[in-house]
Image (cartoon, rainbow, N blue to C red):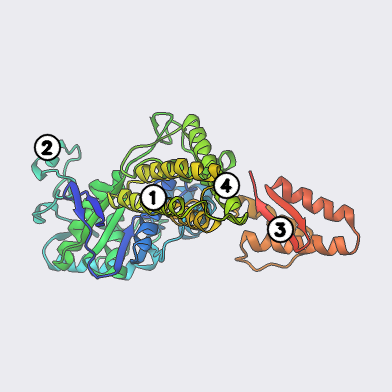
Amino acid sequence: MTLKIYNTISRKKEKFIPVQKGKVKMYVCGMTVYSDAHIGHARTYLAFDIIRRYLEYKGYKVTYVQNITDVDDKIIAAANEKGMNPLEYSKYFTERCLSDLDALGVRRADLYPKASENIKDMIEIINKILENGYGYISNGDVYFSVEKFKDYGKLSKQRLEEMKAGARIEPTEKKRNPLDFALWKSAKPGEPSWDSPWGRGRPGWHIECSTMSSKYLGLPFDIHGGGMDLIFPHHENEIAQAEAATGKKFVNYWIHVGLLTVNKEKMSKSLGNIINIRDAIKRWEPEVIRFFFASNHYRSPPDFNEKALQNAESALKKIYRAKQDLENYYREKHEPFSLESEKTFLEEVKKFKENFEKAMDDDFNTPKAIAEIFSFIRVTNKYLKNKIISSEAAKKAYSTLLQLGKILTLFQEEKIGSEIKEKLLKLAEKYEIKVEAEVDGDTLIDKILKIRENARKNKEWSKADTIRSELTQLGIEIEDTKEGTRWRKVK
């Protein structure tokens, strides 16, 4: 089966052929870290997490790069309000945002290059753009001249003449054309700035991604992604900058994720309906949120609402019930009823896997893949009810369900989020537990449980019960067994 991807630049599904056989290089525009990560970020990064997982399932070695914009007008404004250094402010929110995505169950990218750490490379690319005649210097600022780049508009399918007619911004003393965009901005008082051939200043937003993607992946690379709102001007400008500087093709496949709504309204600060990830996972299990997004095709505009999440939760329970039924059955040591029934069921397992792959090969069609899971569950339930297959066949089905479900981010151990981690750190301090600065939530729980274990050995039952109660309040369920104390995260 051949993977086909809807390529935004061609507006059609194309057979996927990587630049280098067996390898995929993928870049996704990352967060501008001026506040907490929200469900819009969740929508985008979960979609690309699934895409990456499926590419790996197909045998590709994926290099996934996601930038961090830590120098930006919004960051500077927010930092000034708090009386903080902008780079310290963005460092704080970088850690919070990545921690929130961890708690949601989104796998981390391979690299997270920061804008502030790649300024030298940006200056080099801007210099090349100027040398090649695609930019100009104006009073300490550097601009890209869109008229010089003949293919400008090829991604968004807009003609330069139409863009000019629709532009509301008049040319200024600095800009020759209202559509020209900044490559370098001259320094302003109180803002982070760096030395450059044009004076102190900082890079424009668009040049960050052109620079970091080409630096870490080379040109051309396979996949560039982001939300549909980035098609124009951000991704259009990225193409212009990279190709004007290098003369090489920038990207082969452009993948854009549909923007979500909340109760059928666009999510925005003005409407007051922005839902942060850390608030969303207080109401819903991370896996429910992930399954809700996976139930919608990545190019569709999902609506985040109570009913939709309830439906996702209900559907997810059915999948887990089927998983548990298969596990119970294969542990019961059943013999096959007949060779024919066994063979027929194993054919169903094979067909399920093929149909799942067929759905995912069709532009990562996750709703169809999920439909195949439920179809397989209905078939499996009949075989289990009649007890006409062996434990070995049930185990094969169980393993296949787990393998394919994990592509959709199901069946993963939930991680401890930053908010719970902060409370665990306070508990650690209470019980005088020494921890490393970068300790993770799981390790914290293990250390606290060690204190409880010692309390039980010393027959300090009140202390042991208090620790159990404190962890329970944080959603950590404890089970004392003969093999030791186990814990799991619950709602």
Q: Is residue 156 above or below residue 205?
A: above
167 left or right, relative to 435: left
Cα distance between the residues tagged 4 and 1: 18 Å
* Label 4 vs 1, first from the N-terminus: 4
Per the image, the residue denoted by label 1 is: 352
Check contact, mark 1 vs mark 3: CB within 8 A: no
Q: Residues within 10 Å of mark 2 (few under 14, many from 20)?
A: few
Per the image, the residue denoted by label 2 is: 165
SS at mark 2 in the image: helix
Cα distance between the residues tagged 1 and 2: 53 Å
* Label 4 vs 3, first from the N-terminus: 4
SS at mark 4 in the image: helix
Depth check, mark 4 against mark 3: the one in front is 4
Q: Is residue 402 above or below residue 378?
A: below
Q: Amino acid at mark 1?
A: Phe
SS at mark 3 in the image: strand
Q: Amino acid at mark 3?
A: Arg
Name the spot of residue 18 as percent of width and height, x first: 24, 65
Per the image, the residue denoted by label 3 is: 486
Check contact, mark 4 vs mark 1: CB within 8 A: no
* Label 4 vs 2, first from the N-terminus: 2
Q: Amino acid at mark 4?
A: Asp
Per the image, the residue denoted by label 4 is: 325
Name the spot of residue 231 as percent of width and height, x first: 25, 47
